[in-house]
Amino acid sequence: QVQLVESGGGLVQPGGSLRLSCAGSGSIFNIAAMGWYRQAPGKQRELVATITSGGSTNYADSVKGRFTISRDDAKNTVYLQMNSLKPEDTAVYYCNFQKLYRDATLENYWGKGTLVTVSS
């Protein structure tokens, strides 16, 4: 089992910055990828950014150039640096770890989420 705890959410003005952190614990090995997803009120959960064990990153078009994902494997932590925030970035942000098992299956683990509100 993998447990994930997010932190760093809050209220920020448009144009501001926030840094989200997600610390993993438990069976933290063979983590193929880490990522951030978000869900705005009345909308489906969507991918924000992912980073593989090799360091390859992927971003949603809506956040490219503004958000940066990084990971610290020594701390089992993934980060999301969010700059130039917009009101449309308001959402609950969820951390995700994908664990690879010996039979080649992937299992997703999720944090409980942290609320980011962008408003003046």
Image (cartoon, helix red, strand yellow):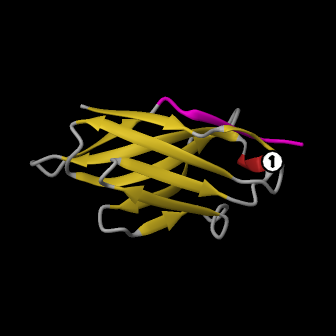
Could you tell me residue 22's position as x and y percent? 45, 42
Q: Nearer the viewer, residue 86 or 80?
A: 80
Can residue 44 be seen in the rendering of this structure? no
Please count the marks in the image.
1
Q: Tell whether position 116 is magenta.
A: yes
Judge left or right: residue 106 versus residue 66. left
Could you tell me residue 56's position as x and y percent? 39, 70
Q: Nearer the viewer, residue 99 or 26?
A: 26
Q: Is residue 92 above or below residue 20?
A: above
Q: Residue furthest left?
A: 102
**Element under label 1?**
helix
Q: Tell whether position 106 is magenta.
A: no
Amino acid at dot 1: Pro
Q: Is residue 39 above or below residue 103?
A: above
Q: Residue at image x 77%, y 49%? A: 88
Residue annotated with mark 1: 87
Which span of residues is magenta-colored? 112-120
Can residue 93 be seen in the rendering of this structure? yes
Could you tell me residue 7's position as x and y percent? 54, 37
Q: Residue at image x 90%, y 43%? A: 120
Q: Residue furthest front?
A: 74
Quarter of the picture holding the N terminus: top left
Q: Residue at image x 20%, y 51%? A: 30
Q: Kindly indicate the quadrant of the structure image that contains residue 16.
A: bottom right
Could you tell me residue 8's position as x and y percent? 59, 40
Q: Callout 1: few (<14), some (14-19), or many (20+) C-alpha neighbours within 10 Å?
A: some
Q: Is residue 44 above or below residue 30?
A: above
Judge left or right: residue 73 versus residue 66. left
Q: Residue at image x 30%, y 35%? A: 25
